[in-house]
Every structure is written in C-alpha cells, then in structure tokens.
Image (tube, rainbow, N blue to C red):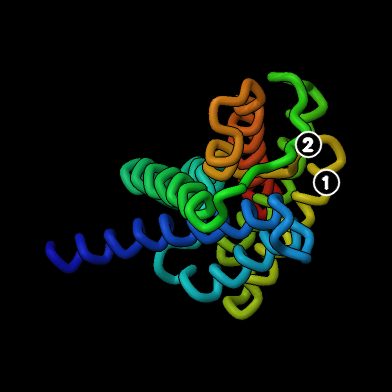
C-alpha cells in the first residue's frame, strides 16, 4: 500500500512540475523574455516532458487533457481530480515565480469580450486537433519513440489554429494563471474542455 501511495505521489508531482514549467515558459515568452514564438516553446516543453515524464503520469499538464482522457476511461475519477488540482497549483506557482524573478513583469494581452464566439470557437477547434493527436498516443497507436513528437506537433497545430482569433492557450490551468479574474477567463476554460472531450472521443470513434 505504501509503494502504491508513493507511486501516486510521483504522478501528481510530475503533473505539478510539468504544468509549472509550461506556465513559466509561456509567461516568460508572452512578456517578451524569449526570442522564440510562444507556440513553438509550448510545443517543445510538452514534447520534451512527454519523453522525460510521460511514463510517470502521462504528461497531461493540462486540465482539459485530463478531462478528455477521463472521458475515454483511461484514468480514474480520483486521479483526474488530483491531477487537475496539481496542475492548477503548478500554474499558480509559476506565475508567482515569474513575478519574483522580474519585478516589472506584465502581459500585453489582447482580450476579447467575455463570451466572444470567435474566441471560443478558435480555442475549441484548436483543442480538438491538439487532443486528437493525444488520443492516438493514449490509445497505443503511436510508437513510444514518436509520442513526444506527435503530442508536441499536435499542440503546435492546435495553437496555430487557435491563434487566428484567440490568445491560443488551450489550457485552463495556464489561462487561470495568466488571466486571473478577467471576464474573458470563462471561455478559455470551457472551450478547451469541450474541445478535448470531442477531440479524444472523435479519435476513439474513428479508430474502432
């Protein structure tokens, strides 16, 4: 029982650490402290984390992904809830870390109205394509050596699609950390969650 608990703690900590790293890199990029475009950095971080920690937790580092994986019955409800809590903590800690590193820190985010349809649709479609690739990995259709490339590439594709109309976040934990109490937050949480459930179950239906 003690071994099982330790194994679970490793999974949860991996999710916290991965979301912390992703949020940290995205935050620094948006503030102008990285020369590489944000979507490319996010894809690299996720792809690398799949290779380094995917065997521990699955490297979700995104509440929408966790909910999508749960909808495919690939993770228990208990683990899904704890994953999401860990992800939210990781993203929040990252914002505090960036604030501590840079006293004059801020974003110039072009926010739309609270429930702008085009923003929601962009986040939804971007997440559908992103999680379609994740579903292929979760379903065991992708060789282990290619999983990081497929997931990172899927994220880059999804972010590129979403960027046409939105901030291209596709991650409720990162959105909450970046946007805080902004009236635009709701759409950046709901659209990726719906997109993840649709994208993953679309793959499952097509691959039967």
Residue 166, label in figure: 2
Mark 1 or mark 2, earlier in chain: 1
Towards the viewer: 180 or 135: 180
Instruction: Evaluate whether residue 3 shows in this view.
Output: yes
206 with respect to 27 (left or right)? right
Q: Are marks 1 and 2 in contact (CB under 8 Å)?
A: no
> In the rendering, at what x and y percent does residue 6 appear?
22, 65
Give the residue displayed 75% in from the left and 50% down from the top.
158
Residue 197: which quarter of the image? top right
Instruction: Evaluate whether residue 19 shows in this view.
Output: no
Look at the picture and state if 28 lies above or below 78: below
Towards the viewer: 171 or 81: 171
According to the picture, the residue beneath numbered tag 1 turns out to be 161
> In the rendering, at what x and y percent does residue 121 appear?
77, 30
Per the image, label 1 sits on a secondary structure element best described as helix
Between the residue at mark 1 and the residue at mark 2, the CA separation in whole angstroms equals 9 Å
User: Comparing marks 1 and 2, which lies closer to the viewer?
Assistant: 2
Q: Quadrant of the N terminus?
A: bottom left
10 with respect to 89 (left or right)? left
Towards the viewer: 93 or 118: 93
Residue 39: which quarter of the image? bottom right
Give the residue displayed 34% in from the left and 48% down from the top.
79
């Amino acid at each position: 029982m003690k071994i099982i608990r330790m194994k679970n703690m490793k999974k949860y900590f991996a999710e916290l650490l991965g979301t912390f790293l992703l949020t940290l890199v995205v935050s620094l990029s948006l503030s102008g402290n990285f020369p590489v475009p944000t979507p490319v950095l996010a894809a690299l971080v996720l792809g690398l984390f799949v290779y380094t920690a995917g065997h521990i937790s699955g490297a979700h580092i995104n509440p929408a992904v966790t909910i999508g994986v749960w909808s495919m019955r690939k993770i228990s409800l208990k683990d899904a809830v704890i994953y999401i809590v860990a992800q939210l903590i990781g993203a929040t800690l990252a914002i505090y870390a960036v604030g501590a590193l840079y006293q004059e820190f801020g974003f110039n985010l072009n926010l739309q109205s609270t429930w702008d349809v085009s923003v929601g649709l962009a986040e939804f479609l971007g997440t559908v394509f992103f999680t379609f690739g994740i579903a292929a990995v979760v379903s065991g259709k992708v060789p282990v050596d290619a999983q990081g490339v497929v997931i990172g590439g899927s994220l880059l594709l999804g972010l590129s699609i979403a960027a046409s109309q939105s901030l291209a976040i596709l991650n409720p934990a990162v959105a909450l950390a970046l946007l805080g109490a902004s009236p635009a937050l709701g759409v950046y949480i709901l659209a990726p969650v719906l997109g993840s459930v649709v994208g993953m179950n679309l793959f499952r239906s097509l691959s039967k």
